[in-house]
Image (tube, coloured by chain):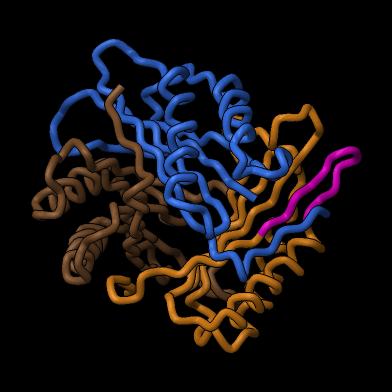
Chain colours: A orange, B brown, C blue
Amino acid sequence: MPHLTIEYSSNLPGYPEAQALADLNASLCASPEILDEADLKSRFVRTSGSFQIGTQPANRAFVHAQLRLLSGRSPEAKKDLAGRIAEVLRRHTPHPAGVLVQLSVEIVDMDRPSYVKERL
Amino acid sequence: MPHLTIEYSSNLPGYPEAQALADLNASLCASPEILDEADLKSRFVRTSGSFQIGTQPANRAFVHAQLRLLSGRSPEAKKDLAGRIAEVLRRHTPHPAGVLVQLSVEIVDMDRPSYVKERL
Amino acid sequence: MPHLTIEYSSNLPGYPEAQALADLNASLCASPEILDEADLKSRFVRTSGSFQIGTQPANRAFVHAQLRLLSGRSPEAKKDLAGRIAEVLRRHTPHPAGVLVQLSVEIVDMDRPSYVKERL
């Protein structure tokens, strides 16, 4: 059931999405928290509208990953999963000259009792 | 105030979004949890960037619905709402030949005290 | 670390995204809750797929803001931040003739122990 969404600002052109996805899914599925590799659904979203970071006119970019998991994981497991994601994104994120790039990773608990999951 | 977002992978072309929305809103607004039909805001999002499901080279697709509600609903009410959404998406989701399609539905509590809602 | 996402329905053409972002970031960064202006990452998302509000054939639109913050803020601080966002969006949101426009603002707590944040 995990859902991974990686959003990045449109001033990071040429983001190697497919390579990053392959590495992200491999690293996360190697965790004991993910029992069936087919459950992990990962996608990239590039900002399509306007964005602004802070209030200064600096040249800034962001990459933000959100992993949504059924509730019940230990704090240690969540930190480990966030670290796996950060490690891959740190390697793959482009660094255009003069752009300050921020990376963040967030783990979200999904409500387990009401979650529906099926294969059609 | 409920917000429904249905995201699906771009390898499910021809998704009948408008028909599914009509049925989703009708089914959810028939629940006693939704007092004013005008409150329910539903939208479809088709993945615009790369996506990958798991680590195997299988042909896979996903549909994921997220319903965000003000906190305070009972577990039974949440399960009922998730079931209504799943029932509609099960009927409308395309099944391209050779593609394994996963469906999931998540209910999210929104923080009630800080929520702002107004008509402009 | 705050992440602000403002989503609006595609029947609100000409939304002044850049002006709204400048005012949103200025107003939020003036709050004592945001210590470093560079941390605030704000973006607009216009619906790209189909959307439907309620079940009646009325002409309706929505603007929905979500601010994600590390957990630990007081209820008063969250209400203040939501109010700042609403005030700016109330001013900037277009009002096409005959369209009922709904505005909502949601504050979300992010799990603090597992959050990763770094500058690349």
- Residue B62, relative to residue C60: is it above or below? below
Question: Relative to residue C38, is residue B8 drawn left or right?
Answer: left
Residue sitting nearer the eye, C78 or C69: C78
**Residue C10 appears at what percent x and percent y?**
40, 28
The residue depicted at 38 percent of the width and 62 percent of the height is: B96
Circle count: 0
Residue at the spot x=28%, y=71% of the render?
A: A114
Q: What is the residue that sits farthest to the top in this orientation?
A: C97
Q: Determine which quarter of the picture holds residue B63.
A: bottom left
Q: Is residue B23 left or right of residue B48?
A: left
Q: Is residue B70 visible?
A: yes
- Above or below, comparing residue C91 to residue A112 in the picture: above
Residue under the point 60% across and 44% down: C33
Position of residue B40 measured from the top left corner of the image (x, y, whole percent)? 23, 42
* Image quadrant in which the C terminus of chain A is located: bottom left
Could you say which is closer to the camera, residue B120 or residue A12? B120
- Residue at the right extreme, as displayed: A97
Q: Position of residue C38 (x, y in %)?
A: 73, 40
In-image side of C47 versus A23 (left or right): left
Q: Residue at 60%, 47% (x, y): give it.
A: C2
Asked if the magenta segment contains residue A97, the reply would be yes
Residue B29 left/right relative to A30: left
Q: Quadrant of residue A25?
A: bottom right
Residue numbers of the magenta segment: A93-104
> Could you tell me if residue B87 is visible in this image?
no
A4 vs B23, nearest the viewer = A4
Q: Is residue C58 above or below residue A17?
A: above
Task: Decide whether residue A40 is among the magenta residues.
Answer: no
Answer with the quarter of the image where residue A88 lies: bottom right
List x then y, in percent, for residue C112: 59, 65
Quarter of the image that includes the N terminus of chain A: bottom left
